[in-house]
Image (cartoon, helix red, strand yellow):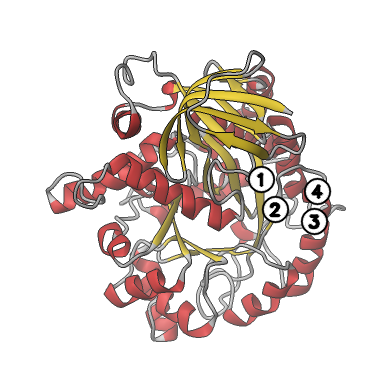
Amino acid sequence: MTEFHAETCLLPDGWASGVSMTVDADGRISALAAGTSPAPDAVRLGAVLPGMANLHSHSFQRAMAGLTERRGGSEDSFWSWRQLMYAFNERLTPDHVEAVAALVQVEMLESGFTSAGEFHYLHHGPDGTPYDDRAEMAGRICAAAGATGIALTLLPVYYRYSGFGEAEASHGQRRFLHDPDSYASLIEAAQRHVGALPHARLGLAPHSLRAASVKDISAILPLVENAPVHIHISEQVQEVEDCLAANGQRPVAWLMDHLTVNDDWCLIHATHMDEAETAALARSGAVAGLCPLTEANLGDGLFPAEAYLEAGGRIGIGSDSHIRIDLAEELRLLEYGVRLTRRRRNALAGPGQSTGRTLFEAALAGGAQALKQPARGLAVGERADFVELDTADPVLAGRSGDALLDSWLFCGDKRQVRSVHVGGRERVREGRALVRDKVAAAYRSAIADLLDGAG
């Protein structure tokens, strides 16, 4: 049993002072009380928030962050970026994948994320041949999580086609590909790796409607009981146009009409929805998985956040391609996108409400739902995942309550994160992950190998 005492803490029913929290050997909160004084042996904390879920990660893409910011001979887009990503993937080995994933997880922890959803689709060897262990690459993601201590929801990706109408997969996609039978073998193998971790879940991830048919999605859904199900959808205008041409419907409408989309599902991006789709997704209980920094970097467009939240829709956030990993900046950019298009401030909060707290609590609940990780924040029976902010930092000086959260999300970044605990175990101290030095050294070695001779 470990005793913690926070000067101030955001609980499910609001801010509280003098919060004592007892964490049992399994990492769950066994007792919690406000208005208390610290016990002599308690770990003393300042301002504490529940840990956030990062619901969408392609960790291997962290290795190419910053290497695609040069314009090509014609207009650049998501699709030209994708070709560069395919070429980069050909060089990745299992050792590279593990080293990069560990750095991504360290950077997530240092930013205030305590769990991660890895949408993992790099499965096979460079020529498309499966490894002896079908889940070799997925196992390396799990190994990284074992080293860093982040709570992992592994989402092995089902990828079969290159486009709508079951178009034949391209050469650049050969490391991703499965049919329902081989995917079942992947899931079986992945389960062994996930089962070796504390705080881990296994889910399913049909890549997109262009890469997985509705028939195949229906076939793979029974493979994991009570699984979170994640899918890319409506990220690009071309994707919407191609779906309309092939199916006569927009992607979200097509998905809703052909599969039962409920609160097990997370629709990643969902950027280009019309009013009917926006309302339908909100009614479904599914989570919209938003990645504002990546969506901005790729020129995806802006999610209809205002209409969706007004309709009762659920959201979570992810860092996707990891062009930058910063929890505060993801939420800030989500709000700023609406401010810039609507030309008004505090656009996503209700009258009299804190915008920071509105966004934080929405993403907290939606991310937990999407990953099937702790759902109620800091409460008895829940896992003790929490983040301590450094109230001595000038950004947070003199702030308390919602003003503290607003100041962090709109004025700050990961530098205000002082400590992070997952399952009651310290993973970040004084702003640095405990395993940062070892992980960073392995990452530097991997990058040197990857870029050697790459031009």
| Tag nearer the camera, 2 or 3 | 2
Quarter holding the N terminus is top right
Q: Residue 191 — which label?
A: 3
Drawn side of residue 79 relative to residue 352, left or right: right
Q: What crowding class fits label 3: few (fewer than 14 Cα within 10 Å), some (14-19), or many (20 or more)?
A: some
Q: CA distance from mark 2 to mark 1?
A: 6 Å
Q: Amino acid at mark 2?
A: Arg
Q: Residue 180: image x %, image y %?
A: 73, 74
Q: What crowding class fits label 2: few (fewer than 14 Cα within 10 Å), some (14-19), or many (20 or more)?
A: many
CB under 8 Å between callouts 2 and 3?
A: no
Q: Residue 201 — which label?
A: 2
Q: CA distance from mark 2 to mark 4?
A: 10 Å
Q: Quadrant of residue 181?
A: bottom right
Q: Residue 309: image x %, image y %?
A: 32, 60
Q: Earlier in the sequence, mark 1 or mark 4?
A: 1
Q: Amino acid at mark 4?
A: His
Q: CA distance from mark 3 to mark 4?
A: 5 Å
Q: Nearer the viewer, residue 180 or 28?
A: 28
Q: CA distance from mark 1 to mark 3?
A: 12 Å
Q: Residue at x 73, y 31 (%)?
A: 147
Q: Residue 152 — which label?
A: 1
Q: CA distance from mark 1 to mark 4?
A: 11 Å
Q: Earlier in the sequence, mark 2 or mark 4?
A: 4
Question: What secondary structure is found at the residue carrying circle 1?
Answer: strand
Q: Residue at x 27, y 73 (%)?
A: 275
Q: Earlier in the sequence, mark 2 or mark 3?
A: 3
Q: Is residue 241 above or below residue 359?
A: below
CB under 8 Å between callouts 2 and 1?
A: yes
Q: Amino acid at mark 1?
A: Leu
Q: Is residue 96 above or below residue 225?
A: above
